[in-house]
């Protein structure tokens, strides 16, 4: 089975990523999946839409599972609630075949990605290589 060059690149990027970069990659992956779901919805491609929404849901689930309430406390609880809300939006979008919930989920995840990138740009990356990832100070 041949692997596409993009898949090779992505695999290498994931394997070389530190925890901070992995979270960014997860956000990007969820956003890409939602973009594809919206495209499939516009084109009336039910299977493609459902598959893309399922991928976005799996990524948001992984983001939620990565939270550590013992380390991040209130931040983890707030993110967990937000991830749950995004998942409900994705379920609603798939069930109703509707774009507004996808657009809202996309906007929320994009805002979280921007916040994460801001957080990582000001953090000392070397300090996070051996410690749990947290933007709570």
Image (cartoon, rainbow, N blue to C red):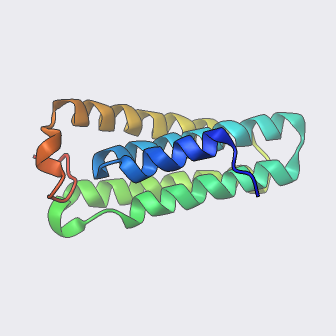
Residue 91 at least partly seen: no
User: x, y percentage for residue 26?
Assistant: 46, 48
Quadrant in the picture for the N terminus: bottom right
Q: Is residue 128 left or right of residue 45?
A: left
Percent coordinates x, y for residue 102 in the rendering: 64, 41
**Residue at x 18%, y 52% (from the top left corner):** 129
For the point 45% across and 44% down, the residue is 13
Front in this rendered view, residue 63 or 2: 2
Q: Nearer the viewer, residue 14 or 95?
A: 14
Q: Quadrant of residue 125?
A: top left
Q: Is residue 58 above or below residue 19?
A: below
Percent x, y of residue 34:
64, 42
- Residue at the spot 46% in from the left edge and 62% down from the top edge: 62
Q: Residue furthest front?
A: 2
| Depth order, front residue of 130/26 | 130
Q: Is residue 66 visible?
A: yes
In this picture, residue 20 sits left or right of residue 101: left
* In this rendering, position of residue 26 left or right of residue 76: right
* Vertical side of 104 occupied by 80: above or below: below
Please provide percent x and percent y for residue 12: 47, 47
Q: How many marks?
A: 0
Q: Residue furthest right?
A: 44
């Amino acid at each position: 089975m041949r692997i596409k060059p993009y898949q090779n690149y992505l695999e290498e990027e994931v394997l070389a990523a530190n925890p901070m970069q992995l979270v960014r990659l997860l956000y990007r992956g969820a956003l890409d999946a939602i973009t594809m779901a919206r495209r499939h919805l516009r084109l009336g491609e039910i299977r493609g839409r459902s598959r893309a929404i399922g991928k976005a849901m799996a990524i948001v689930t992984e983001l939620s599972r990565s939270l550590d309430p013992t380390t991040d406390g209130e931040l983890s609880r707030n993110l967990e609630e937000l991830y749950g809300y995004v998942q409900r939006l994705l379920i609603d979008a798939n069930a109703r075949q509707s774009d507004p919930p996808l657009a809202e989920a996309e906007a929320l995840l994009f805002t979280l990605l921007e916040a994460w990138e801001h957080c990582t740009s000001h953090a000392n990356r070397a300090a996070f290589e051996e410690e749990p990832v947290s933007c709570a100070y």
